[in-house]
């Protein structure tokens, strides 16, 4: 089975904790992704932040997107994987936690991101049912 290190996007873009929510939304839109990792200045993963997280906090929490920072609204501790985790294992994690992207860590440092599509492409042809289930994640 293929390992995460072989299918991950290396050196992924991430949000800085001191970045404003306005800047974060702009970067998410620019990269055409729904969520991004949040890292500290050392590149250590702190959270995953989605457009939905930002919108809920701004609209329901009454936060100012021009002055509130990513660090002030970052989500819970993220679910992550290791470089040697298998594609099949990644898909099971994605299904169990309803995720489309998983950060890959080397210690605390973010070294890559594995998307559901990349994990699916790495699956053997006989594992179609698992892939179908994974692709049904909303």
Image (cartoon, grey):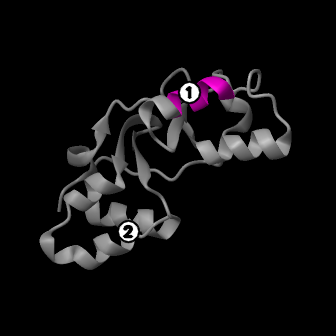
Q: Main secondary structure of the magenta part?
A: helix
Which of disc 1 and disc 2 is earlier in sequence?
1
On screen, 80 above or below 67? below
What is the quadrant of residue 120 in the picture? bottom left
Q: Residue placed at 46% from the left, 66% from the top?
A: 137
Disc 1: which residue: 26
Q: Is residue 129 left or right of residue 110?
A: left
Please tell me how crowded label 1 is: few (under 14), some (14-19), or many (20+) other residues with Cα within 10 Å. Answer: few
- The single residue placed furthest to the right in the displayed view is 62
Magenta residue check for 27: yes
Counting from the top left corner in percent of width and height, residue 7 is at 23, 47
- Going by the picture, which residue comes out furthest to the left? 125
Residue 35 is covered by the magenta coloring:
no
* Residue annotated with mark 2: 134
Q: Which residues are magenta?
A: 21-28
Q: Residue at x 34, y 30 (%)?
A: 11
The image shows residue 12 at horizontal and vertical percentages of: 38, 32
């Amino acid at each position: 089975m293929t390992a995460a290190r072989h299918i991950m996007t290396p050196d992924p873009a991430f949000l800085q904790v001191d970045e404003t929510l306005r800047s974060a939304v702009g970067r998410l839109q620019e990269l055409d992704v729904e969520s991004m990792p949040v890292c500290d200045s050392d590149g250590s993963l702190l959270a995953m932040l989605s457009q939905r997280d930002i919108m809920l906090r701004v609209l329901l929490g009454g936060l100012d997107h021009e002055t509130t920072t990513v660090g002030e609204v970052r989500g819970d501790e993220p679910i992550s994987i290791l470089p040697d985790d298998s594609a099949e294992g990644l898909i099971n994690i994605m299904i169990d936690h309803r995720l489309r992207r998983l950060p890959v860590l080397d210690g605390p440092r973010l070294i890559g991101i594995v998307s559901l599509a990349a994990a699916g492409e790495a699956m053997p042809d006989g594992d179609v049912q698992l892939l179908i289930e994974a692709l049904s994640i909303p």
